[in-house]
Image (spheres, rainbow, N blue to C red):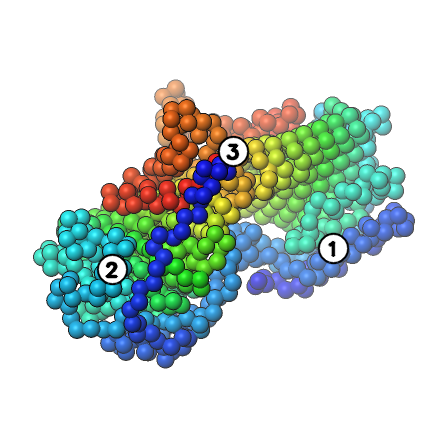
Amino acid sequence: MSAVLQNLVNQPYKHGFVTDIESDVAPKGLNEDTIRLISTKKNEPQWLLEFRLKAYQQWLKMDEPKWPNVKYPKIDFQAISYYSAPKSKKKLASMDEVDPELLRTFEKLGVPMNERAKLAGVAVDVIFDSVSVVTTYKAKLAEVGIIFGSISEAVQEHPELVKQYLGSVVPVGDNYYAALNSAVFTDGSFCFIPKGVKCPMDLSTYFRINTEASGQFERTLIIAEEGASVSYLEGCTAPKFDTNQLHAAVVELVALDNADIKYSTVQNWYAGDENGIGGIYNFVTKRGLAKGVNSRISWTQVETGSAITWKYPSCILRGDNSVGEFYSVAVTNNHQQADTGTKMIHIGKNTRSTIVSKGISAGHSNNSYRGLVRIAPTAAGARNYSQCDSMLIGDQSAANTFPYIQVNNNSAKVEHEASTSKIGEEQLFYFAQRGIGAEAAVSMIINGFCKDVFQQLPMEFAVEATKLLGFKLEGSVG
Amino acid sequence: MRLVAGNSYLDSLLAGRPQRPAAFSSPALAWLTQLRANAVDRVGALTVPTTHDEEWRFTDISPLSKLSFQPVRTASPLQAADVERFYLAEATTRLVFVDGGYAPQLSSVARDLGVVVMNLSAAVSAHAAAIAPHLGRHTAFQDNVFAALNTAFLHDGALIVVPRDASVAAPVHLLFIATQKEAASYPRCLVVAESGSTVTVIEDYVALRDVAYFTNAVTEIALADNARVNHIRVQRDSDQAFHIANCAVSLAHASRYQSVSVALGARISRYNLNVRLAAEGAECAVDGLALIGGQQLADTHTLIDHAQPHGVSRQLHKCIVDGAAHAVFNGKIMVRPGAQRTDSSQSSRNLLLTGKARVDTKPQLEIFADDVKCAHGATVGQLDAEEVFYLRSRGLSDAAARNLLTYAFGAEIIDRIPIASLKRRLEQTVLEQTQSN
């Protein structure tokens, strides 16, 4: 490794600070009383409490998944506090009334709120430790009939919609962490795009984990009715802590006939220090149901943070001619572990899916792509194309590919290809010849490698993602 | 782990275990007795795998444990005339095993070959020095119940030792014939290619009757520096048979292993091939073809383990799946830390001929070194409509066009077999199978 770049390798985590806000924290531990407490605090209807308790009962019977290619000490689920909310204050009339401490936090993060939100044309639903504090642009969206806000609000204001769709894509007992989330989720985003409406702006949420040792259990539900379309952005940063934090979110997307949902994520949670101490455990269940004909669900993710990432944004292509897409860049450095990929379940006729996955592993990290393409007997004419490329930086890192391809229909066509490469001395030499330093060269090569995915991101995110990758990998090549 | 059959099934299989052969009784062979005893212990500790085990996720072998299989104790009465049709003109050296037992009257060993081709129990004393470092050393049975069972039954088998710098021009034919219903056979082969030697080995499984039997084979192949081994494996068991095989290959410096395995028969077949490139500059080419129909299941698991730098591996695996058959392929390429400059490519191609045919393929890469070139690809589909149209525009019927394309798909693998008569025979089989549609 070149000396020039060496000192750039472990850049301190830029967003590592703790905001000092009084939190309303539930005692540690998980039992039915905890769940009842959450439900009561949030003033939830009886059916939702039953939904939670049912999930809890299923969770008790399940075991932690052992199959991911990741290693971590056993999680003590009784040592986690399952509810933490900033102390509620009276309703805020304007942005000026927002806790200045909170505003400073967003300032440091560079969240485009206030005028910046307007200029950027982004409606930001701010999740701050599980409770939605401020929602902007709500009125503007309401004009066209879009409901966008926190899921707790939606439970109060649109219980029929939440009841109809919650758990319809990810059932309560789907997997260990989804069951846990279903039992104890505290907040998250809810988005409903009515029939025929094209959402006039990109919707965005900033997630941020605060309060040491409070697990965060987000629940996101996005519904696009017939002919509706929406682009949803999720960006994540988290403060620096030494104890591991568990994050077990569930995201459900439902697309009806001719609907289109695009979900983009940039994840940059605290990954632990250079020795692998600390960092977030990111165990997420994301799934989209392309329920109607000609519907489309597209996932784009840039995963750069977290000590452990365990995440498979999936598409169930039930409607005929429905389309699923997955574009991913996963970067791991130091002692990070990522086991991520997607599932494309083809059920409807002429369903199509595309998978483009780019994994970059540096330092002592372990980066795995795990994907499933299943063609059901009913999926006549289904088509899948998968491409998984890995780049290794340094000889201590690992890159793995585990694609499962299950085909039950002979009219389907499935293609998978994967390759592994490194940044070669010759490439760097070529750049040097033209007066471009190693640092800039690496950044360019990486961006070229990830171009297919970055192109899918909305513009603001593409810029952020390009920068993030630069930060993460500078100095790890030489 | 949930059990399909309790250990009682394994116990019933073990019950038929033959006593230690007299040839193994010399004190110098105590290690062999110990190896067998260890294997028996492992069988006792392990269970029959189920679809809950990742390695057996797509292959349900529970039908196996519904039948009781016992080894055949009597010597075979077969005469050359009964099995001549399986002989290969090119192979002057031949070891024949009937229901797992060595059949000297059917075998033919050329004396002046300069190479040892013998049944194991006859050779074990004279060639102990060549056998001891390899027998049971390459196939780990710690977590593999079928390899453990085979090792527990170890009493005879095929032994090929090619001395230093010897080159055997004619291929060696190892022919395993199944004749009896509900017979269990545990074939064992050991090929030791000493440095600079060259040999071609054909491992051939055939059946005289269409009955249910159980073959559980283990083959070990050790290549010393600069050795070359060409390994052809043909599994044409009866359509009711169960065929489970483990093959472990170890490659020393600059050695080269080439293999073609063809699976045509068996109701359920499983082939585990582990190739370990244990020293620098080793090379392997591993190709496979599964041509199945009806209710057949053919499962191939391969592991190409690049343990040292500068290794090269090439793999092409094809499946042609007809009827309601089910093909499984799991190909893992492992590049261990420090195995720099590895160059590996793998391809899994699958052709589904009917709406009920099914393929589960999983090409896997696990890479722990950065200066490597690794690529893999997988495709699943039916015949290309444009290719069919092209042939039809030249006057072929739809059926003829499809048969020709299917045949060509399989012939790419069969063409890599360097033995003309076997190649012709297999091509004929593929042709018949494709035309029967």
Chain of the residue under label 1: B
- Closest to the observer, B180 or A41: A41
B299 to the left or right of B146:
left
- Closest to the observer, B429 or B260: B260
Q: Secondary structure at mark 1?
A: helix
Q: Secondary structure at mark 2?
A: helix
How far across and down, in percent of the image, does residue B412 sit? 53, 28
The residue indicated by pointer 3 is: B373
- Marks 2 & 1, CB-CB < 8 Å contact: no
The answer to which quarter of the image holds residue B343 is top right
Q: Residue at x 36, y 80 (%)?
A: A33
Q: CA distance from mark 3 to mark 2?
A: 48 Å
How far across and down, in percent of the image, does residue A7 sit? 45, 43
Mark toward the start of the polypeptide (3 vs 1): 1
Mark 3 vs mark 1: in front? 3
The answer to which quarter of the image holds residue B177 is top right
- Marks 3 & 1, CB-CB < 8 Å contact: no
- Closest to the observer, B332 or A216: A216
Chain of the residue under label 3: B
The residue indicated by pointer 1 is: B39
The residue indicated by pointer 2 is: A104
Q: Residue at x 42, y 54 (%)?
A: A271
Disc 1 residue type (three-letter): Ala
Q: CA distance from mark 3 to mark 1?
A: 38 Å
